[in-house]
Image (cartoon, rainbow, N blue to C red):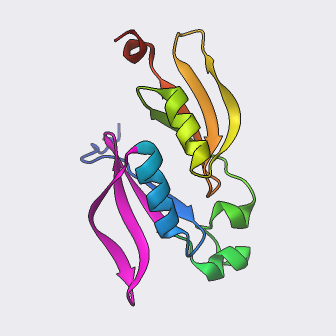
Amino acid sequence: MIAVPRLIGEVSIRLFVRHGDQQRALDFYENVFGAQVLGLPYLHNGELIAAELRMGASVVMIVGANPRRDADASLGGPRSIHAIGATPVMLDIHVDDVDSVMHHAIEEGGSLRNEVETLDSGDRAGVLTDPFGHLWVVKSRRKHLAA
């Protein structure tokens, strides 16, 4: 039997946005989800390339896609959602008030994909597309709603 390696850290996510949209993305996630920039952002020749955000218990890196890769699929990924045309990924985020977060996200430039509804579990959830093409399932868990 082969020994399975033990995970010694968290799995983190990199969200790619169109080159030049990095600061807009950071601002959106800070304003809508309360994300906080961790440490110093990654710069190249003084230009913002990427930054890590703390979002609840998770760390997410926002990265500007390489414009050459976005323009030429034969170079391989990663590419921004705008270059691909759609995303195969949905990100779940748990908040204490799904209705106000969804409303605020739309005010900040996101778009509604699925209205907020109460699920069979008692949780409330809605889906939005952020201004950069990422799909977010915004949820309030039943235990938070009862508090």
In the image, is residue 2 part of the stretch drawn in magenta? no
Residue located at (49% from left, 68% from top): 22
Whether residue 54 appears in magenta in the rendering, the answer is yes
Residue at x 57%, y 75% (from the top left corner): 19
| Identity of the residue furthest to the front in this view | 107
Question: Farthest bottom residue?
Answer: 45
Q: Does residue 7 lie above or below 61 as drawn?
A: above
**In the image, residue 103 above or below residue 118:** below
Q: Nearer the viewer, residue 7 or 99?
A: 99
Q: Is residue 49 left or right of residue 85?
A: left
Q: Can I make out residue 145 in this image?
A: yes
Q: Can residue 137 be seen?
A: no
Q: Residue at x 55, y 19 (%)?
A: 124
Tell me: 71 left or right of 4. right
> x%, y% of residue 117?
63, 19
Give residue 125's position: percent from left, percent from top. Answer: 57, 25
Image quadrant where residue 52 sits: bottom left
Q: Quadrant of residue 80?
A: bottom right
Viewer-side residue, 50 vs 21: 21
Q: Which residues are magenta?
A: 34-63
Residue 140, image x, y percentages: 47, 23
